[in-house]
Every structure is written in C-alpha cells, then in structure tokens.
Image (tube, helix red, strand yellow):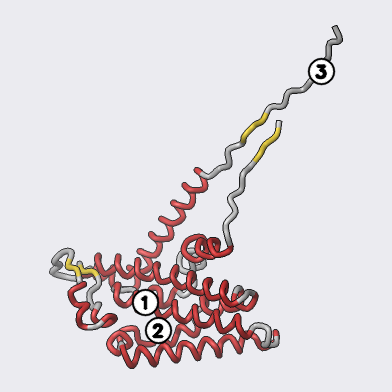
Amino acid sequence: MDTTTVEHKQSPYQEIIRQGLWKNNPGLVQLLGLCPLLAVTSSLTNALGLGLATVLVLLSTNTVVSLIRNFVPNEIRIPVFVMVIASVVTVIELLMHAFMYNLYQALGIFIPLIVTNCIVIGRAEAYASKNAVLPAAFDGLMMGTGFALVLCTLGAVREVLGAGTLFAGADLLLGDWAKVLTVHLYQADHQFLLAILPPGAFLVMGFLIAAKNTIDARAAAKAKPVEQKISRARVTHVSTQ
C-alpha cells in the first residue's frame, strides 16, 4: 500500500501576503511594536493614522535597504539601516506636521518612535537585506498592512466600547469633509474608561490573540492530510493449464 500526498505550492508573493497578514502578523504573532499598538489605539482615527505611517515607513525602508544591501559592509549594516529608517520617519513626520497637524499632535511622540519599532528594523535585517527590491518592498507593504489592520481593529473595538462612536475625529486624518463619517452607535452618559485606558488595550489585545489562535487550531484540525490508500494486485501463481 502506498500513501500519496498532494502539496499545494504557493508563489513567493502569496506566501508573503499570508505571512504578513496572518501567519506571522507583527502584532498578533510576533508581538512587536506593542508600545504604540496599545498606546494610541483609543480611537480608529488614531490607529489608522499611525498604521498608514508605519506602512509607508516599512515600504520605503525595505526598498532602500534592498537597493543598498550589496554596498553596505556587514559590520556596519545595522547602524546604516537605522539611519535609513530615521531619515524616512523624519520625512513622514514633517509631512504629517505640514498637512495633518491635528493628527500629528494627537499621535505625539509615537510618530518619531517608529524609528525604534522592532518591526521596521527586524524586516530590514531579516528580509530586505537578503532579497531583491520588489519582494522586499512587497514584504514591507504586507507586514505594514498586517500591523495596521491590528491597530485599526483595536482602535475600533476600544472606541465603540469606550465612547459609543466609530471613526470619531476622522477630519483630523482626511479633512473637514470626513466629519460625516463619524458613526454614533449608542449614547453613553459616561465613557467606559477601562476600554479607553491602557488596561483595556491589553484586554482587547488578549482577546484578539486568543481568537486568532482558536481559528488557527480549528483550521489545522480540518487540514489534516487525507491518506489515499492504493491497493496493488500481486500475482502469486500462474496456472499453465
């Protein structure tokens, strides 16, 4: 009896999408960047603003690091990568200061702190410095998007539980016209402070991680390979009559 298994082969870009958005998500699996993840996600607007900034930083730094990877001596690669990250973050910080000043004030110190975010330096060292430009840029985009999705989910849940609104202050990010995007789900006499304060962020984050682990466990249980048993006929005797 033979056992045959069929393997589904994914393209490198499909694997990058899968790793960044789910399997190796920076926020839910690697648990990197928890300081801004838990500190600024009191509303969906703040979370989306920081998420977009992180996506731009990851995309830009991965691209630049991949371009210069063959010209940087191995002994000084980390300081060079940090200088690249700091330069990109400075540009984005100045742009936000010029065009999104109110959001820039709301996010505060957490914009320049992207320089020290372990996600950014980690992807630069682990992936961008070892791969071509296009895969490196795509990896930065997917890792940043995965992190931004976790930020937005946290921000949305905490805002709904704490204030009864969704996307309040959208005009800080998108302009005055975006005030109409604010959704009032219920009228609360008092805000639910536990959801808005940092302890609420830890609790919601814990539930998100538990939900992901449950989904992964159920998917793994359903994906057990089905063994296909093939019987072979064996000739034991040939009659000459």
Q: Is residue 192 left or right of residue 143?
A: left
Choose mark 3 or mark 1, whichever is in front.
3
Disc 1 marks which residue? 39
Residue type, label 1? Ala
The quadrant where residue 174 appears: bottom left
Front tag of 1 and 2: 2
Which residue is tagged 2? Answer: 110
Circles 1 and 2, Cβ within 8 Å, touching? The answer is yes
For the point 49% across and 72% down, the residue is 32
Which label number is shown at residue 12? none
Q: What is the CA distance from the residue labelled 2 to the residue labelled 3?
A: 77 Å
Label 2 amino acid?
Phe
* Residue type, numbered disc 3: Thr
Question: For residue 236, which numbered disc appears in the image?
Answer: 3
The image quarter containing residue 191 is bottom left
The spot of residue 78 in percent (x, y) is: 62, 85
Image quadrant in which the C terminus is located:
top right
Tell me: residue 205, above or below residue 104. Answer: above
- Count of number-bearing discs: 3
